[in-house]
Image (spheres, rainbow, N blue to C red):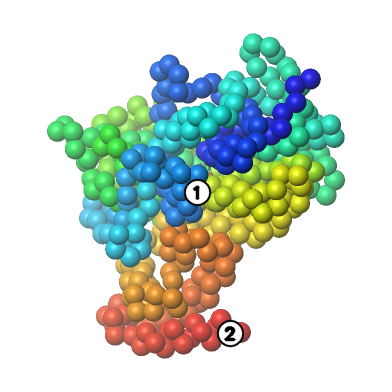
Amino acid sequence: MKKNEISILGSGLIGSLLSIYLKKRGLDVHVYEKRADNRKGEYKEEGRSINMALSERGWKALEKVGLKEKVLPLTIPMYGRQIHNEHGQTSFIPYGKEGQAIYSISRGKFNQLLMDEAEKAGVNIHFEHRIEDVDLRNFEITVDNPESGLEKISSEVILGADGAYSSLRNAMLKQVRFNYKQEYISHGYKELSIPPTADGEFAMDPNALHIWPRGSFMLIALPNPDKSFTCTLFLPFEGERVCFENIRDEKDVKGVFQTYFDDAYQLMPQLSEQYFSNPTSSLITIECYPWMLNKSLLIGDSSHAMVPFYGQGMNCGFEDCMILDSLIEKIGTSAWELVFAKFQKKRKPDTDAICQLALENFEEMKADVADPKFIIRKKIEAKLHALYPNDWIPLYTMVTFSSMPYSEAYALGKLQQKIMDTVMANPLITQNWDKLDYEDIIDQLDKAKAV
Ligand SMILES: Cc1cc2nc3c(=O)[nH]c(=O)nc-3n(C[C@H](O)[C@H](O)[C@H](O)COP(=O)(O)OP(=O)(O)OC[C@H]3O[C@@H](n4cnc5c(N)ncnc54)[C@H](O)[C@@H]3O)c2cc1C
């Protein structure tokens, strides 16, 4: 039987980056991927591509393996949210300080680049190799591929980077004392697009993440280097007036878009066609623990799938790779169980925090951003940050533009939220926000931290 040193399950974003990290440590790395190699032949990624927002944690993990400069040309910076109201008027809310941005990147192209780099480094990626079973007693994986059928491969170390429906996690589920919780949210999503204009330009500002918040549902759009936008429509599956269940034909699609997203509708000539040909996908949160069993470990979405509303799933998974690598650097490769034990202990509180924040941010994106008071709140927090950069850091900044552990950002964010709720309760806040006693707000935070 073939024996691998390291078997990574899945060559998605996290499996591919992880393979590069491990190869650089001199290990023999094999990756098993159920899909065909999408770099060959005519690859179409419409329908489920969804471009991603790459931010500080992701960049840092890429930089550590020398990939930042290679990824940068694939991205477009987005400096803030461009909010579209129902009358087509827009307002811009910066994400952070001037120059701070999150970066739009196509999932498909990014994944291809990471797989190219993995292979260049010497990683063996086995496409069309679906993991059918993981035997955790004998440390064997059963792989199915069209040429040789079912094959058993033994491995010293097994890393499950096979996403939210992980085969390694399924095997762990059969063990005693494995905790597992999954929850589908009420909303699903569908990919749509806005093409370039007739003269080949972007139809909207390319340096913003566009949001059409409508209370219980929303549309967002991120720019692509070919001057199109990839849009994602988030709707409840059922139970509301505007929901996927109630959109049955072209007339329904047009009705919803003309009523709620008319400015976007004017830019979407293929709306109905795309709406009915692209799938409607669901959104899941997964928590489980422990992430390891002997020399096997779950990483990325397989251990902590989250809803996409903080734009952190991939960034968090990349940070996982970097933290795991730092532990390997410190402890070495002769004590994998110790490396994995330290990894899960350090990381679990942080991934719990970001999973929770991602759920909470859904409310902010689909409803709060449309409230004029939300803009005032953001302005007050930006001013506090400008006046006292080390004392008041807005939660979004801590999560997106820093590498502060997510759990610390979460705790501090809650204290700040409480103080801001009191500040915003002032009935004259809209007129007076600029004249507040900002020093007093910082004092309140200091006191809250001391408790
Ligand atoms: C709509 C949406 C928008 C998002 N936007 C963002 C964003 O802006 N920023 C961000 O940071 N994150 C975002 N995310 C989250 C991000 O997509 C995930 O966190 C990330 O893709 C996780 O990567 P992964 O490699 O762990 O899993 P996956 O991307 O799911 O990859 C798993 C891989 O394993 C393979 N596989 C699965 N099962 C098997 C098997 N049995 N055998 C062999 N191979 C297998 C799959 O084919 C796949 O290639 C978004 C998610 C969604 C749904």
In the figure, is residue 267 to the left or right of 342? Answer: left
Q: Amino acid at mark 1?
A: Lys
Is residue 239 in sight in this rendering? no
Q: Quadrant of ligand 1?
A: top right
What residue sits 35% from the left and 71% below the top?
Answer: 382
| Residue 84: percent from left, percent from top | 28, 53
Furthest toward the left, the residue is 199
Depth check, mark 1 against mark 2: the one in front is: 1
Q: Who's the residue at 63% across and 22% down the image?
A: 129
- Lower position in the chain sequence, tag 1 or tag 2: 1
Q: What residue is disc 2 on?
A: 450
Q: Which labelled disc corresponds to residue 220?
A: none
User: What percent of the width, then of the height, locates residue 23?
Assistant: 59, 36
* Camera sees residue 121: yes
Q: Quadrant of the C terminus?
A: bottom right
State left or right for residue 81 relative to residue 412.
left
Q: Is residue 181 above or below residue 395?
A: above
Residue topped by disc 1: 64
Dot 2 falls on a residue whose secondary structure is helix
Q: Which amino acid lies under the numbered mark 2 shown in the image of this protein?
A: Ala
Mark 1 neighbour density, 10 Å: few (under 14) some (14–19) many (20 or more): few
- Image quarter for residue 173? top right
Residue 120: x %, y % from top left: 50, 29
Give the camera-side residue of 30 and 184.
Answer: 30
Front residue of 215/341: it is 341
Which residue is at a point 60% across and 32% down the rendered structure image? Answer: 10
